[in-house]
Image (cartoon, coloured by chain):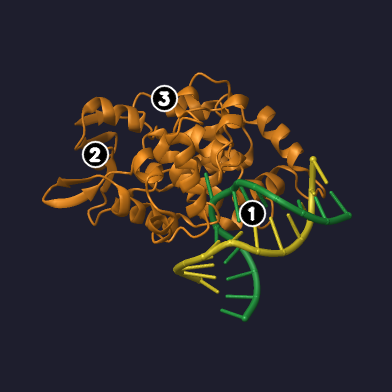
Chain colours: A orange, B green, C yellow
Amino acid sequence: MEFTARNFHLGHTLECGQAFRWRRLADGGYEGVIGRTVVHATQLGDKLVLAGAPAGTLERYFQVHEDIAAIVGTFPDDPHMRRAVAFGRGMRLLRQEPWECLASFICSAAKQFVQICQVVDNLCRALGEPFEAGGRNEFAFPSVEAVARATHGQLWSCKMGFRAKNLLAAARLIDSGKVRLETITAMDYPHAVEELTKLPGVGPKVADCALLFGWGRQEAFPIDVWIERALRRLYFPGKRRVTRRQLVEFHRSYFGPYAGYAQQYLFHYVRNNPQSLAAAPR
DNA sequence: GCCCAGGCCATTT
DNA sequence: AAATGGCATGGG
């Protein structure tokens, strides 16, 4: 499957920390699992070659239709966002399967990207549906039911530590119908957050990640330690006692209709350029 | 050994 | 509303 996609940067897209099942191959391409398929992705300029899954699946997952230039054009025009956009040019948000995204981010709390990938891989090998691809055994991301029926010990052995009991309890709440992920789509943003945060291990940050990367909700603006640092040091330089509430008010009024996108560009930038936070540039 | 990592939660001020 | 400590694990 071949697409012509302008303003598309596969590397930034797959390595900016939004998805955890991709690995970079020696030839510069990427390989990852979407549903029950292994997908191979490579890029040469505007030419994007995606193989291994039906075209519709790939178009949706990679959001091929999105006009990144137009989205980036809505960002506030300030020095920090200009640098973030210059650094991550072509990065786009994926549309992941909501449960997989939610469960992965439950496992992400206070862990680094590489570690999260390892835990997610452990989880898939332990509880995911096996399938064969290219002569190799691969594993789908485990279903809600598979996780709900697992034992605490099985999750524990995936090296997710204290997150194990949260993931197990969350899967059981969803499996029993007490929290219904299918209802999230129709909810407005505040209700969606309220519903997701009923799940143990899901606070505002994890809920925002799931809503942004799984449900495509642009109002979602995950505030992790890096984004909090970025907001404070870049947009409130030198000010003491900036409250959480002020940060939320600021980002909701400042970043525009694609705030979630802006957040990801900023995150990717500061995460890979820590010096950008050392002394606030003007 | 220490500190921190794409947090959350209960408890305390 | 904000601070604090606990919760597991691994890397610098």
Say if labels 2 and 1 share a chain: yes
Q: Is residue A176 left or right of residue A10?
A: right
Q: Percent position (x, y) of residue A97?
A: 38, 34
Instruction: In this rendered view, identify the residue nearer to me: A33 or A279.
Output: A33
Q: Read off the residue under disc 2.
A: A36
Residue at 58% x, 20% y: name it. Answer: A188
Work out whether residue A92 can be spotted: no
Q: Residue furthest left?
A: A135
Total tally of numbered discs in the picture: 3
Secondary structure of the residue carrying tag 2 is loop
Q: In this view, does A1 lie to the left or right of A115?
A: left
Say if labels 3 and 1 share a chain: yes
Q: Percent position (x, y) of residue A190?
A: 62, 26
Q: Between label 2 and label 1, give the one nearer the viewer.
A: 2
Mark 2 and mark 3: Cα distance apart in space: 28 Å
Residue at 28% x, 31% y: name it. Answer: A58
* Label 2 with label 1: CB-CB less than 8 Å: no
Q: Read off the residue under disc 1.
A: A277
Q: In this view, does A162 lie to the left or right of A9?
A: right
Subunit ID for the residue under disc 1: A
